[in-house]
């Protein structure tokens, strides 16, 4: 049993066992269990981000967040789990992993009898396995949703109604949920954490696709050759190898491609003023950002110390 030296400390600790989040950020509407957490969170909305990463240029308001970010550019994993010897880049990632070894608390799926040691793992299970329980269907596109309110928000995408405005760039959105996801592109917030590793995602769909890299699940199978894919997009692209279809055509020279990314890459050859990605260490220029990243990793890998 955990002990505390004051009633106030005990009260603060008890909040961690509650699901209530009564304190909200007025900028992005994210909720928190404690008022001081709101204050710490609101720093991410500030323009003042004095800690700049020299490798990718990203800025941070907190020094410890910046230090953790720097580790994403390195393969170093200094934090080790004593139970299974797994290695992690940050203490937060290790702490989240340790919950796997805690067998005292389980989370049960209300759709079936499956139980999980972590709530986020349960959430992934519900979304991946029980999606068929979405019963509120849009009569315009046949897409289904879990609740009537989500369906109402979705219908605005058909009418063009956009009431929600991004406080950062002024872009308009049809629903609060879509706006929240967009705001993460400004704040860098990634609330959907993988239960298997320390990777985070701004959207739940991104998490679901990533989880399949751990589970090796490949639900999309080709009817021609039985090859399987973890994403529907992968199956759609693969099918073109059987059909020979090339739906992406260049409007300059009429050359056609099976993949959109191949068309985008090709069209850059027609633009003499195309922007060049410049290395901030040696000022060498590249036509693509991924070429620049390979250059920085290979040539300046130790530049950030």
Image (cartoon, helix red, strand yellow):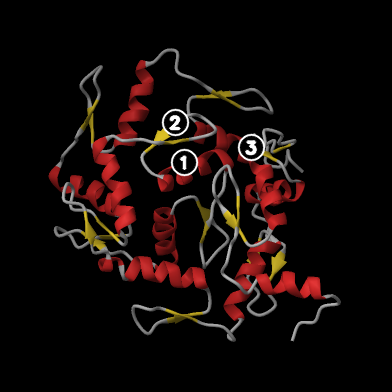
Secondary structure beneath label 2: loop
Figure check: 7 above or below 26? below
Q: Where is residue 81 in the image (x, y as percent from the top left)?
A: 67, 73
Front tag of 1 and 2: 2
Front tag of 3 and 2: 2
Which residue lies under the disc numbered 2?
A: 171
Mark closest to the chain's N terminus, 1 or 2: 2
Figure check: 234 above or below 19? above
Q: Which mark is residue 251?
A: none
Q: Position of residue 266 (x, y in %)?
A: 33, 26
Query: Residue at 59% across / 45% down in the picture?
Result: 26
Mark closest to the chain's N terminus, 3 or 2: 3
Figure check: 204 above or below 62? below
Residues at circles 1 and 2 in contact by the CB criterion of under 8 Å: yes
Which image quarter: residue 15? bottom right
Which residue lies under the disc numbered 3?
A: 58
Which residue lies under the disc numbered 1?
A: 182
């Amino acid at each position: 049993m955990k002990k505390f030296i004051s009633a106030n400390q005990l009260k603060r600790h008890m909040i961690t066992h509650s699901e209530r989040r009564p304190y909200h950020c007025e900028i992005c509407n994210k909720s928190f269990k404690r008022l001081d957490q709101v204050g710490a969170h609101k720093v991410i909305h500030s323009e003042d981000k004095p800690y700049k990463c020299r490798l990718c240029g990203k800025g941070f308001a907190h020094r410890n967040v910046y230090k953790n970010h720097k580790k994403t550019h390195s393969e170093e994993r200094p934090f080790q789990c004593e139970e299974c010897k797994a290695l992690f880049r940050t203490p937060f990632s290790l702490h989240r992993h340790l919950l796997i070894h805690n067998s005292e608390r389980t989370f049960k799926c209300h759709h079936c009898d499956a139980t999980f040691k972590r709530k986020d793992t349960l959430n992934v299970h519900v979304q991946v396995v029980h999606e068929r329980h979405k019963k509120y269907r849009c009569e315009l596109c046949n897409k289904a949703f879990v609740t009537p309110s989500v369906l109402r928000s979705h219908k605005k995408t058909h009418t063009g109604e956009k009431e929600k405005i991004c406080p950062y760039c002024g872009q308009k959105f049809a629903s609060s949920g879509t706006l929240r996801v967009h705001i993460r592109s400004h704040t860098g917030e990634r609330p959907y954490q993988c239960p298997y590793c320390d990777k985070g995602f701004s959207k739940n769909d991104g998490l679901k696709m990533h989880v399949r890299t751990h589970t090796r699940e490949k639900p999309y199978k080709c009817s021609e050759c039985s090859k399987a894919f973890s994403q529907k997009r992968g199956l759609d692209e693969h099918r073109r190898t059987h059909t020979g279809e090339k739906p992406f055509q260049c409007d300059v020279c009429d050359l056609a491609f099976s993949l959109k990314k191949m068309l985008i890459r090709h069209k850059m050859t027609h633009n003499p003023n195309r922007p060049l990605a410049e290395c901030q260490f040696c000022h060498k220029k590249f036509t693509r950002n991924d070429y620049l990243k390979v250059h920085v990793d290979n040539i300046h890998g130790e530049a950030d110390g």
